[in-house]
Amino acid sequence: MLFSSRVSRRARPTKGAALALAALAVLGVGTANTARAQTPTVRYAAESGSRNLIFVNNPEQIVVNYTAPDGITYSDLADPGLGQKSILRVSVGPGNHRNFFEHLNQSAGTHHYGVQVYNPSTTATVSIVIRGKGFNTGRFGDTARPVLGGQPFVDMLNNPTATSFSLAPGRSAWIFRSDLDWNNTRPIQVGDFFSGVVDFDVSGGSVFVTNLAYQNFAALTSWSYMGFITRQPAKSTDAPEARVYKGTMGGGVVTNLSFAVNDSTPIGERPVQYPRYKKQAATSTTPEQYVASTQTVTGPNWYTHDMPWRESDTSSVFVVSNDLFNISMPGFGTVYALQPTPMSGTPFAYANLANWGVQYHQAITITNSGTRSRSFQMRLGTATGGGAPVAYRGSDGVWRQSTLGGGALPYFSGTVPANSTRTYDAYYIIGGPAVGKIRNSLYFTN
């Protein structure tokens, strides 16, 4: 999506992907009208034209011969003798897709990672176009090999490619290999967090997409899909694997915000508003879920990339909520955005915790009725001060990466001349591993 500065024209949210944003059906508040332009309403919609996201984060920890507290021994690699398992196997149809994965190597040795496509048809040839890829592996505290969760998106989006090939019936091909694509210069060592992304287009039929971790590519023969992992960690303080997920979901969201300023508008963040989502108890016909209430959250920022099930009436931060997608998990079902989902074989019920890998689009319209130009910044941060890697597209159209903390990151800037209206498009993507509750704001600098 190209950066643009548009005069007096609003970006349009559309109906979006097949897996629409779960909250849209229950959110009854529209974008602020002219009379309320000083306090616009944040409302996200699934963005038409964004890539269908295949997010792979289950299991988050790749292990070999790990015996969980329940006595079951797990091995997650695709090599013979090391599990012969695939991490994901999902069918996708014709369209534009993005495969984004993030894991931690807790196995017994160095390994690599690959993404394969397979044409199950007996008659039709499928066409594949690889648009780009990126990959990072590192360790926290290692200055030579830092964890840079936003870097794979930066590498891919700043260097688009177009490699095309045909996939005959019954044939497979690798569209991503961390060992081959980077000439074995980025092995995934024990204790490394690693993440990667590949954009690809499919036409002429459906394909199976398979994600695998492996030590020896030449030894790979066959494997079975490991399914959704619900194992427990050795330490009770660690998060269970049931909290992470994998599957298909919408890949992009957009919100349209209109701000009115003049000469007396102060320097600083501009207020926005959005409905607060609150828990609605289960009935005989509906499950427990979170819906937009009549309570309005008003403040100088808005919080995304989290869901409301962890909030209470005494919380100091409330999230927008309707930016989150449902996730379709092959072999499991749906992990809902606003409805806790019981995880089979565990006492846990979770919803979509956050939108890792989803592209956020802020379409910002500013009307300046004053006699002097006003400059602004779009800013990002985290509510807790914890780290969150981000890839963002600056006002020069170049993608960069950073790690959000307690302070504000100005990731996009612009100027609105006196007595004029401008619309700007700002984009960012949260990589992994990352905390939730991303703080968004628009800040006037003069």
Image (cartoon, rainbow, N blue to C red):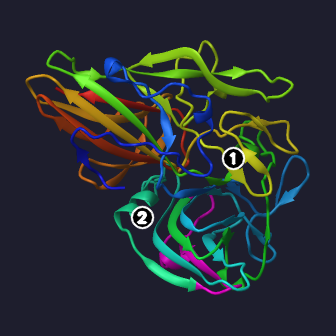
Taking the image as drawn, is residue 158 in sight?
Answer: yes
- Name the quarter where the C terminus is drawn: top left
Q: Secondary structure at mark 2?
A: helix
Taking the image as drawn, is residue 184 in sight?
Answer: no
Q: Which mark is residue 244?
A: 1
What residue lies at 75% left-to-right and 43% top-to-bottom? 240
**Splitting the image into 4 quarters, where does residue 76 fall?**
bottom right
Residue 138 horizontal side relative to residue 220, left or right: left
Q: Is 93 within the magenta?
A: no
> Where is residue 300 shown, x and y percent of the image?
38, 21
Q: Is 169 within the magenta?
A: yes
What residue lies at 79% left-to-right and 78% top-to-bottom? 80
Between the residue at mark 1 and the residue at mark 2, the CA separation in whole angstroms equals: 25 Å
> Where is residue 194 shown, x and y percent of the image?
56, 59
Residue type at mark 1? Val
Task: For label 1, count other residues whose C-alpha is less than 10 Å away and answer few (under 14), some (14-19) or many (20+).
Answer: some
Residue type at mark 2? Met
Q: Residue furthest left?
A: 371
| For marks 1 and 2 on the same chain, the one whose residue lies earlier in the sequence | 2
In the depicted view, which residue is nearer to us: 432 or 37? 37
Q: Secondary structure at mark 1?
A: loop
Magenta residues span 167-194
- Name the quarter where the N terminus is drawn: bottom left
Residue 408 in the image: above or below residue 275: below
What residue lies at 56% left-to-right and 85% top-to-bottom? 166
Q: Which mark is residue 132?
A: none
Residue under label 2: 156
